[in-house]
Amino acid sequence: MGVSESKIVFKQSVFKLIGDDVLQPDNDIFAKYWTIPERVDDVFDLWVGGDVRVLTYTNPSEPGARKATPGEQCSPMTNLETLLYNAIAHLERLQKDTEQPDEYVARQILNCMRILTRVMPFIFEADHLREWYDKFFWRPRKPQFLNWDEKRDTHTQLFDGLDPRKLYSKEDKDKEIGPPLGETLIDLVVDYLFWRGLTLPSQQEDGGRSDRGYELKVWKTGIGCSTSSKCTSEHERNQYEVIRLLLTLTSSTLYLRPDQVALANNKALTYLTTKLEKRVVNAINCSCLNTVLRFNPNLWTIPSGWQGARDTKKLLVLNCIQFLLVTMVYIPPEGKNLFRSSMGALFRPDDFQFIHHGVNLVISQPMTTSNFSIGKSNAGHHATEMISFLWELIQCNKRFRRYLCETKVGMDYLVIFLFYARDSVADETKQGLMRMVIFVIQSLSAEAAFCAKLNTPFLHVSSLPLVMRIENFHGSYADFLICSIHCLITASKGRLEPVYPALFNIIKNVAPYAKHLQRATSSKLVNLFEMLSAPSFCLKNDTNHVILKSLLDACNAILDNHYRENQQFIRVLIASKKHFRALQQVTVEGALAEAERQAIERKDRGHVLSPTSHSRGSSIDSMRRPIAPRTPSLANLPEDSRFAIGDDEDEDDEGSVKADVDEKADQRVSKTPDAGGENRVPTPVRLSEKARGKQPAALRLSTSRQTSTTSLPTLTPVTTSQNFHPSEQWLESWYTQLPLEPILKVIEESEAGKQDGVSARTSTSSAPEEQHDADVRRATTAEQPGLGREARQSAQLTRQSTDSGRSAQAAYGADGQGHLGIKDNIRPAAGGPVSFQWTAVAIGWYNALIWSRIYLQEAEAFQGSGGLYSSTDIKLFRRQGASQEISLKSPKGAIDAVGASLAQRISSISIPDAFTGGGATGGQTGTGR
């Protein structure tokens, strides 16, 4: 639509559509909507959101209409209904058109879809149209009224909205004349996904006519297809617009509150996921999945500053993966989700390898690409969606889950997930991504085979990005996982408190399988115990003690299953005996007095302490005995009673253990005899029955899978100490259930030296561990110095398991729930492995994360009035406004280069604008947290 006259004609048709006159179905104005526009921008730029919204309100000037009161359900303008009927009817007619050229027919099909794509978000936005939408789209179609008799104030004729030539009498007003309009529309759009001449190549028949028509054929080779369809870039552009309309038809979720999502019936998604033929669902899944996995983001492309966000290939890939996610995560009210079942039915190892290669190529890109690679500045544009897809596949396909857990692929993904978690912890815009990767790790950690693989030595540590390196690290993947969790918690300064349950459940899940834990890892575990047992954390709310119990369960699981193989861990426990005994001697009076003292201290300081920071004297030692009068008790408190691991005054300097221990210190301490005998380690293969018997009965008997208690901050705020007041009954309700006895029993046995020849057995039992440490060091130093950093990274991230030991079938089995289990006498931690459990809150959060990504992609690709959802009132997540006016910080048109340069030069000067004072909603961004 390059000619100004055409633009004027289209704009005039918009004015007539929103005018007071009721247009008849055969009016020529409707034909202009699918014959004049040539590009998607013609529709979105000339038909602005305000004009579309006018159609959603009843026109009081229409015959028989009345003005609706606020909050009342009503119908939109009749012209909107007529436009929808005409667009859908024209899509149906074009399927039978074989006379006109492909280009002409394809343009009309796309324009009809663009009109529907433009209108549907405003229909979903309008709360007063909810009942009308259900009736108009999702009830069997009935005759519509054609004319109005103003004299008699009644309708005079009925007709079929999709075919105005079919007339009905007044007696037929309640007659069902066809399936619901929404079903007809979705069937048409799905057909056009596989339409020769639009999304698939067509061939010329005899006589020069094209063989346009429906052909159920996968777009690209890969899963489910071995023959190329030979689609061109034109076909890909059309595929993008069809997928975009399907996403728009399912976007009513954007206009729900998060707490409504879990129980909401998205009727478009319900029909898509339950009513389509199985072969059609498989073709859609394979077409979208192959399109995503075949895309290589690492190929050199023009940087985004030159090309912009309108790369059709990337937009197609984004919409394909987003459509897969939207259909996979949806829970229909009745029946099973066919899209999710289709993904769960994949079983060929070649398909799993293909998926792994495509996913790994995208999500590992930030770890392997230099920040100075100009052509790859936008390469990881759909990494978040790929991680979401991987998580969904792990949950719905037990064969793929087995593939990850039985090969080294699972360890590669673990490192990548930890990178995203460490990289996002300080970025407010990436909190949703950070939480998601933590939940993915929790899902994997519930699998026995995955946990067993964590004992593999972790090599090539020096090739990791700086953000996730751990100084002087030597150990296994289990060591690296625990150390990374410790770094996440300490670096976040309390911001990660809502996901503490997930992080400590990960530790609890892997603990029964952990062998040869390094001294530094063990020290970090005890350091976490210090944080969780501090009054500033324990007494903050009524649920934090559950996290403390989870960590103690993990420590007991290590002792119960691999006592002999974890001598370093036991030494650290013994060196830190003072702090475990302090928790054992907590009294109600002391705890409440400490809570009162902290409240006074916070009031004096004027701020609330971070959960991971410790106030002066906030050690658990201050809770050990009752404190009498307030003034003497405060005066007698130590200046700083925060413990450091190994600060027991009864221990020799050689036996002390610091929180951060380098390799030389590890060797020195392990070789130094303990003169006092307090650090001697008894060597039973498992925790003694006596120690196990002292655990609370409820903990010994409960081994079933528990429901996750993970909360999300934007939906369920964490209770703080300001509105929670601990009581004696509350403290007694959980304190007596803490599983401290096994750890204290180990400490008692080390002090008493009850076992004969304990020194000899200790040195003997520590030999395998020393040999393991030596093997790790030799393997680490054996890395070829000639290999470049990027080459080593690439090899580390894409390697496959080449172990030729016993077969996976012999090594691993599966339990009745489809979870992998290893044939070993492993006793899980109390309560059993804890996987991520979906709740209504979690479903609302996850949908907000997915749809916020869709919103952002649309806002970046179609800025201003062309944004698909930018002009509507989103309820699923929060948005931050940004002004669209011309300024130095937001230049427009010809002043782009000059404005950007000036803005950089004066960036240190404070310029008040929309970024500091608010603004319009045109440039809104979704947080999805």
Image (cartoon, rainbow, N blue to C red):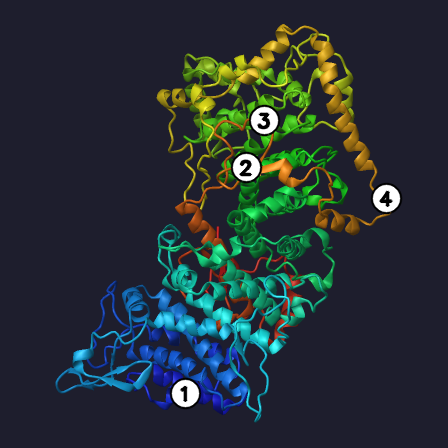
Which mark is in front, 3 or 4?
3
First along the sequence among labels 3 and 2: 2
Q: Residue at x 41, y 70 (%)?
A: 186
Give the residue number, with chain letter if any, for mark 1.
31
Q: Position of residue 712 (x, y in %)?
A: 45, 44
The amino acid at mark 3 is: Asn
Q: Quadrant of residue 742?
A: top right
Left-right relation of 663 to 626: right
For disc 1, the neighbor class at 10 Å (few under 14, some 14 to 19, many from 20) is some
Query: How far is disc 4 from disc 1 in space, using C-alphas?
Result: 70 Å
**Which mark sits nearer the N-terminus, 1 or 2?**
1
Q: Position of residue 557 (x, y in %)?
A: 56, 25
Sequence-wise, which precedes: disc 4 or disc 1?
Answer: 1
List x then y, in percent, for residue 455: 67, 33
Quadrant of residue 52 within the rendered picture = bottom left
Distance from disc 3 to disc 1, alpha carbons, whole Å, reads: 73 Å
Q: Position of residue 495 (x, y in %)?
A: 53, 40
Q: Which residue is mark 2?
A: 503
Task: Identify the residue at horizontal 73%, vertical 34% (top origin).
Answer: 473
The nearer-to-camera label among 3 and 2 is 3
Looking at the image, tell me whether mark 3 or mark 1 is earlier in sequence order: 1
Q: Nearer the viewer, residue 247 or 409?
A: 409
**Residue holding disc 4:** 785
Q: What amino acid type should be assigned to the residue bearing mark 4?
A: Pro
- The residue beneath circle 3 is 825
State which tag comes first along the sequence, 3 or 4. Answer: 4
Q: Earlier in the sequence, mark 2 or mark 4?
A: 2
